[in-house]
Image (cartoon, rainbow, N blue to C red):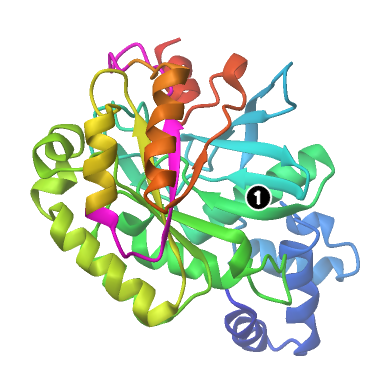
């Protein structure tokens, strides 16, 4: 619930308005997972809350910590027993969490482990928030940045994700700035256009991964519904409406989409766009058969784009020793 909704719900229980602020603070600032923790509320009120409401928190099923870079990979168990993944990464500016928006994924991208068993269900706003609060509680830290690039397609769970964004950025709650939130999509064009109308100050990351429709359709089934021209048209409109630069994600797969010719084709496609290109040497997943591009190929690809005037970064690989790539840990857990 938003604070306004919680205030209405509290009033319906014939309680004073200030109780809503107390409860909201317990949930969103202190990360309470049960009403019993709310020790400044009367026992009778805690009992009433327990009777009328649920706190859909995440519990730690498994936790892996990288020996190389302190990246932490979580398997979280949800209230119905489903399992999702989150990753916490430590940077100079603070802690970033990569959260899931669905249990599994229906998008079918050929290089991704999250989609191998399809989608089970959407996550509620509470369950997306719960990943942040559970990580903060477990590690004793404050998360300052959120990346919606975990399991699932955020725009396939549009309403719950929008509610999550409202809650996570609320100044009365955990208060993470929209400018510190990145939302990744494989290219659901109608939802990109809807999102643009909200004029949120988050970073929209678009998974492109190919410079032409033939290749992209073979890698990403979503391209058969919305091709690259339709996607880039929506992206151009998005930047015009929001004045926000788009980040294009490009996973480099050896001998598939990492040639110099493909880099030039990509540069031609994106010419004139307000954008940043994030190159991602693909995470190797046994079931997909995708192999990571050679370092020399990655550098050559980046150099071509930079010479064409694009801002380019190559994503640093974190948590290589703990299956930090999305979907890998959940799949191995299910197999076991």
Q: Is residue 225 above or below residue 61?
A: below
53 magenta-colored: no
Question: Which of the two residues, 86 or 288, is positioned nearer the viewer here?
Answer: 288
Q: Is residue 169 above or below residue 9?
A: above
Residue at image x 30%, y 14%?
287
Stretch of the chain drawn in magenta: 269-290
274 magenta-colored: yes
- Tell me where residue 243 sits by quadrant: bottom left
Question: Which of the two residues, 247 or 46, is positioned nearer the viewer here?
Answer: 247
Residue at image x 34%, y 29%?
112
Residue 203 horizontal side relative to residue 240, left or right = right
Residue 315: x %, y % from top left = 53, 36
Q: Is residue 82 above or below residue 321?
A: below
- Tell me where residue 9 sits by quadrant: bottom right
Q: Name the residue furthest front.
A: 307
Question: Which of the two residues, 251 or 189, is positioned nearer the viewer here?
Answer: 251
Residue 110 horizontal side relative to residue 172, left or right = left
Residue 79: x %, y % from top left = 53, 43
Question: Which of the two residues, 320 or 330, is positioned nearer the viewer here?
Answer: 320
């Amino acid at each position: 619930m938003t604070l306004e909704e919680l205030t209405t719900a509290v009033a319906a229980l014939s309680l004073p308005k200030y109780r809503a602020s107390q409860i909201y603070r317990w949930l969103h600032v202190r990360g309470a997972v049960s009403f019993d923790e709310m020790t400044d509320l009367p026992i009778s009120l805690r009992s009433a809350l327990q009777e009328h409401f649920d706190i859909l928190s995440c519990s730690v099923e498994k936790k892996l910590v990288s020996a190389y870079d302190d990246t932490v990979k979580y398997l979280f168990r949800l209230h119905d027993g489903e399992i999702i993944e989150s990753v916490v990464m430590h940077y100079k500016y603070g802690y970033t969490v990569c959260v899931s928006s669905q249990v599994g994924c229906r998008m079918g991208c050929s290089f991704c482990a999250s989609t191998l068993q399809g989608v089970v269900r959407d996550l509620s706003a509470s369950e997306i928030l719960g990943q942040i609060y559970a990580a903060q509680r477990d590690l004793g830290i404050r998360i300052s940045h959120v990346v919606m690039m975990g399991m699932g397609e955020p725009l396939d769970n549009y309403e719950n994700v929008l509610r999550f964004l409202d809650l996570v950025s609320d100044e009365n709650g955990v208060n993470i700035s929209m400018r510190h939130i990145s939302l990744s999509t494989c290219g659901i064009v109608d939802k990109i256009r809807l999102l643009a109308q909200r004029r949120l100050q988050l970073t929209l990351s678009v998974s492109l991964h190919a410079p032409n429709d033939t290749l992209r359709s073979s890698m990403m089934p979503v391209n058969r519904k919305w091709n690259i021209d339709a996607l880039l048209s929506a992206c151009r409109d998005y930047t015009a409406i929001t004045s926000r630069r788009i980040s294009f994600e490009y996973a480099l797969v050896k001998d598939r989409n990492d040639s110099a010719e493909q880099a030039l084709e990509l540069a031609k496609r994106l010419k004139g766009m307000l954008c940043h290109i994030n190159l991602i040497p693909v995470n190797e997943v046994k079931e997909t058969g995708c192999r990571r591009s050679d370092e020399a190929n990655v550098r050559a690809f980046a150099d071509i784009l930079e010479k064409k005037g694009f801002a380019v970064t190559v994503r640093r690989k974190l948590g290589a020793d703990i299956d930090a790539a999305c979907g890998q840990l959940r799949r191995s857990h299910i197999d076991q």
